[in-house]
Each structure stands twice: as structure tokens, then as C-alpha cells.
Amino acid sequence: MRVGVAGLGRMGAAMAARLAEIGYQVSGWNRSADKAKPLAAAGVTIVETPAALAAGTDTIITSLTDAAAIDAVYGGRDGLLSMPVDGRLFIEMSTVPPATEIALAQKVRAKGAAFVECPVGGTIGPARTGKLIGLMGAEEPDAVRARPLLEQLCRRLEHAGPVGAGSVMKLAINMPLMIYWQALGETLALCRDVNIDPARLMDLFADTSGGPNVLKVRGGPIADMLKGGSGGTATFDIDSCRKDLRVMLAEGQARGIAMPLVEHTLACFDEASRAGWGARDAGAHSVYWAGRSKQ
């Protein structure tokens, strides 16, 4: 199968490399061409425009920043839909409002192509090893068509319902995690005068009833940051969290749902970004909050 990936950021690049490694013929496009060049060594053919990507592939995956990027990549002069795409399958994997996916599905189907949304839970490591959690929104025949490919990227693939349902579920699974990073920061601030080694502290928190799965993976890097280290490469940064939190809050407002925790958490992440932490890993937000000046 010829697969195209548009949007070769952290997640898009990891998925493209994964598919190339297991034998798919993969092409890729990215707005910043320099960022795409390392993928050539992984067997990914880099093309110059989204239209060229669509022309040379049967299935196109998109992993983009936001609704504006989706509009540009699909609808631009050399966009994915600027050429005949009859019979192709588009799999849209960005974290955007449900309404964005629903509107896009209508445009894709009007061009004679199939459309599946499948935002994912997980970061670069799971993407690279095929262990993401996929949240599909699609009509059943399209979901069946997309499943064999998505199962190469996801350890668990849930068909949540029609297009839009996958986006709702992505916001739902991300929300407790974003709030947790703020809760952990406040927790660390509370006990920062207790003389317990950070690694031991993270191990303790991970072993309690309030410890989420993420601490088993990110506890070590957070402990390293608490001791003055870098914590390693960011897998999902604070500014990306802010973008997702804004989407959650807007979706809640559109549905008449009060989300005071999301609103407060966004304000706290905004503060961390203003303090220069925006490009750091999401777990660093807890470290920022633990070390900020007392109010």
C-alpha cells in the first residue's frame, strides 16, 4: 500500500517511520521541508506539495497543528483536495474540535474519497512502536477499510462512532492528564520542604491510588528535572498542552458544559509558557509549579 503522511512533526514523523519500517511504501510532506529531511534515511520519500503527496498515494494520513493548518493543507492551491482524489482514503489524526473534522469529512466525501478521523493517545515512543490508542470516528465501511493500517500504529483501536466522536474522545482522554500535571505541580509545591529524594518521591506517588499510568513513564524525567536536569527530549510540550486545553474549553462552552478545572489549568499553563517553559515537556509544568515563587 502507498501511504502518504502530511505533517511531519514529532507524531507524524514517528508514524511515517513506523510504517516505512514495517514495509509500507511511504511518502511524506511537511510545511518546513528541512524538518522532513531526516526521514529520507528511514525510507520515506519526501515530496514538495500536499497535492503531490495525494497524487502518489492511495491512503493519506494527516497529523497537523490545528484547524487553520488543516484548511491550508487540504484546501490550499496545492492542497490535498486540489486534484482528483476519487477512491482514496484520508485518515485525519490531528487534535482539533469535532466540528472541524465533520466539516472536513463533508469536503473529502464531496471529492469522491473516504474519510476517517483517528486522533490518538500517546506520544513519540508509542507512535514509533505501534502502541498508540486510536479513537476512530467514521462510517462503518470506512472504519473497516482503515483498520488494517491503523492497527499497525495502535495497540488499541476504538471505533467511537461517526466522524466527530473520535475528536470528542481525544479531548476526553487528554483532559484528566492535563489537569493532573497541574495537580502534581501543586502536590510537589506542598511537599518541597520534605527531605525525600525526587526519584523516591515519584516512585511513591506512582504507587498510590492517585498515581496515573503516566508517572510510570515520565516519573524518572520529572525527578531528573526536580534535581536540576533537563528531563530529556520533550515528547509533548507545554504549548501543545495549551492548544489542547483551549480546544477543550471551547468545546465545553459550545455544549453548555462548565469546565472550571480546565479553565484554571489553562491559566496555569499560560503562566508557565510566559515564563519561558512553553517548549519544554508537559511534565515540566509540574516542576515549574513546584519551584515558582510562593504567592
Image: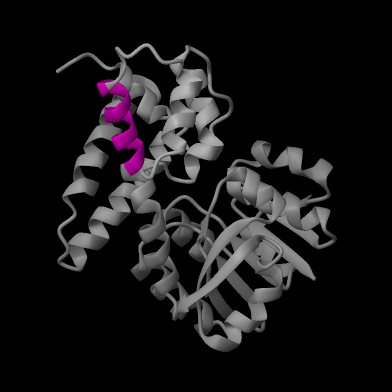
Q: Is residue 144 left or right of residue 205?
A: right
Q: Is residue 205 above or below residue 8?
A: above
Q: Nearer the viewer, residue 206 or 30?
A: 206
Classify residue 22 as left or right of residue 124.
right
Residue 289 seen in this snapshot: yes
Helix, strand or loop for the magenta stretch, by majority: helix
Relative placement, left or right, of 107 versus 267 is right
Write down the region rendered in magenta: 180-190
- Would residue 260 be counted in the magenta stretch? no
Q: Position of residue 247 (x, y in %)?
A: 31, 54
Q: Position of residue 167 (x, y in %)?
A: 41, 65
Q: Position of residue 166 (x, y in %)?
A: 44, 69
> Can residue 82 be seen in the rendering of this structure?
no
In the image, is 220 to the left or to the right of 175? right
Q: Nearer the viewer, residue 224 or 50?
A: 224
Q: Which residue occupies 64% across, 62% down?
A: 155
